[in-house]
Amino acid sequence: MLIPNKVKHRKWHKGRSRNKGVASRSLDVSFGDFGLKSMDYAWVTSRQIEAARRAMSGFVKRTGQIWIRIFPDKPVTRKGEQSVMGSGKGSPEFYVAVVKPGTVLIEIGGVPEADAKEALRLAAHKFPLQAKLVNKH
């Protein structure tokens, strides 16, 4: 599971503009031959990223290489179930990566095109967003 080693602030605000704008970085396939590009806004958890990575690496069976282009660095807090109103903000529970439309999530290289497409299709089912397959060009 991906979590940051050190964070500047333990608890973050949610952010005002959650579903606004498009991605300005990670737009193109840079490392591999094929990639998975986001079409929606989402918070992708570290568990979802790990599930997608395992689905891909299990399908291609140690051939090729996989690059994860997103990293979960935003902490999401939760309060306990029996806590009353007030008493401050909850403790950090998990970390998410904020994904906007146009962000390349995962790349794969060194495998045939059919295998790459199937592996990325399996990975796309693990994410809470719509994604499309893109190639290097």
Image (cartoon, grey):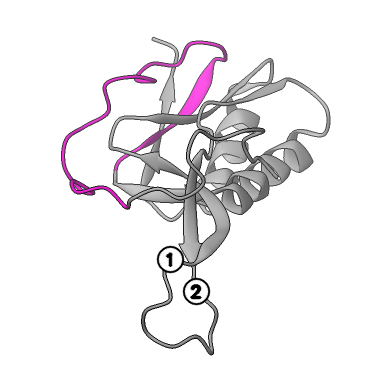
Asked if residue 123 is positioned above or below residue 117 in the image, the reply reads below
What residue is disc 2 on? Answer: 79
Instruction: Work out whether 127 lies above or below 88.
Output: above
Nearest-to-viewer mark from 2 and 1: 1
Kind of residue at badge 1: Lys
| Residue visible at 39% across and 41% down in the picture | 98
Q: Is residue 109 left or right of residue 79?
A: right
**Which of 70 and 136 lies nearest the eye of the viewer?**
70
Q: Circle 1 sits in a helix, a strand or a loop, which is it?
A: loop
List x then y, in percent, for residue 60.
Answer: 75, 33
Q: Which residue is mark 1?
A: 89
Residue 66 at x, y = what percent?
Answer: 66, 25
Disc 2, disc 1: CB below 8 Å?
yes
Instruction: Calculate the distance from the C-alpha at mark 2 to the C-alpha at mark 1.
Output: 7 Å
| Residue 41 image position (x, y, % from top left) | 29, 47
76 or 19: nearer the viewer: 76
Seen in the picture, residue 128 relative to 57 is either above or below; the reply is below
> In the rendered structure, which segment of residues is drawn in magenta?
14-39
Q: For mark 2, does the 10 Å Cα neighbourhood hold few (<14), some (14 to 19), or many (20 or more) residues? A: some
Q: Is residue 33 magenta?
A: yes
Residue 51's tag is: none
